[in-house]
Image (spheres, grey):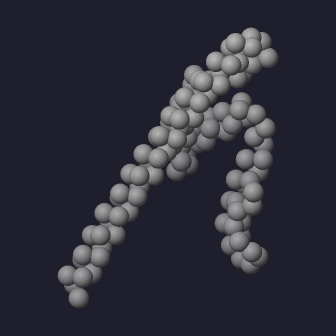
Amino acid sequence: MRRGGGGGGGGKENSAAAANDAELSGILSPCDEFRLWAELASSAGDGAATAKEVYRCFEAVRPIFDDIAQQTQEAVLDLVDVTHDALEKVRVWLSLLVRRALCTFVSCSAAFLLLRWDGS
């Protein structure tokens, strides 16, 4: 999946998109994704706090995936349920984060519009 539009400038933006694509193209298994979230969580970037929360949501399934070749069929079937629960935690946490960001944006926009309206 490619991000971004057509040609032209935006060198810094294009190189960031290429770096993101390179990180994502390296995900071939759940363990690869867990490693990516761990790296993002330990980085000093803007998304480190979010990455820590997502990484934490996967705590219950990480050890099982790391040792999946030695798991019984019953354990693997249980893993489906545990993984579903972990993904649901991620979905709920991220939706709360987005909702909070949206509320902040709407509040700031409303305040800005009120100030502009009062000032005219």
Q: Can you name the residue that lies furthest to the left here?
A: 118
Give the percent coordinates (x, y) of residue 7. 76, 76
Give 108 or 90, whichever is nearer the viewer: 90
- The quadrant holding residue 62 is top right
109 with respect to 70 (left or right)? left
Q: Which of 64 and 38 is in front in this view?
A: 64
The relative height of residue 17 versus residue 55 in the rendered view (above or below) is below
| 51 to the left or right of 35 | left
Q: Can residue 88 be seen in the rendering of this structure?
A: yes
Q: Residue at x 61, y 28 (%)?
A: 83
Residue 20: x and y in percent read: 70, 53
Q: Is residue 6 above or below residue 34?
A: below
User: Could you tell whether 63 is left or right of 52 in the image?
Assistant: right
**Residue 23 point in image, percent of width and height:** 73, 47
> Residue at image x 20%, y 82%?
118
Q: Which of 76 and 10 is in front in this view?
A: 76
Question: Which quadrant is the C terminus positioned in?
Answer: bottom left
Q: Is residue 49 visible?
A: no
Q: Position of residue 27 (x, y in %)?
A: 75, 40
Say which residue appears at 53% left-offset and 48% top-offset: 47
What is the tally of numbered marks visible in this picture? 0
Give the quarter of the image for residue 108. bottom left
Q: Quadrant of the N terminus?
A: bottom right
Q: In this view, does 63 lie to the left or right of 93?
A: right
Identify the residue at horizontal 41%, vertical 52% (top origin): 99
* Extreme-bottom residue of the structure: 120
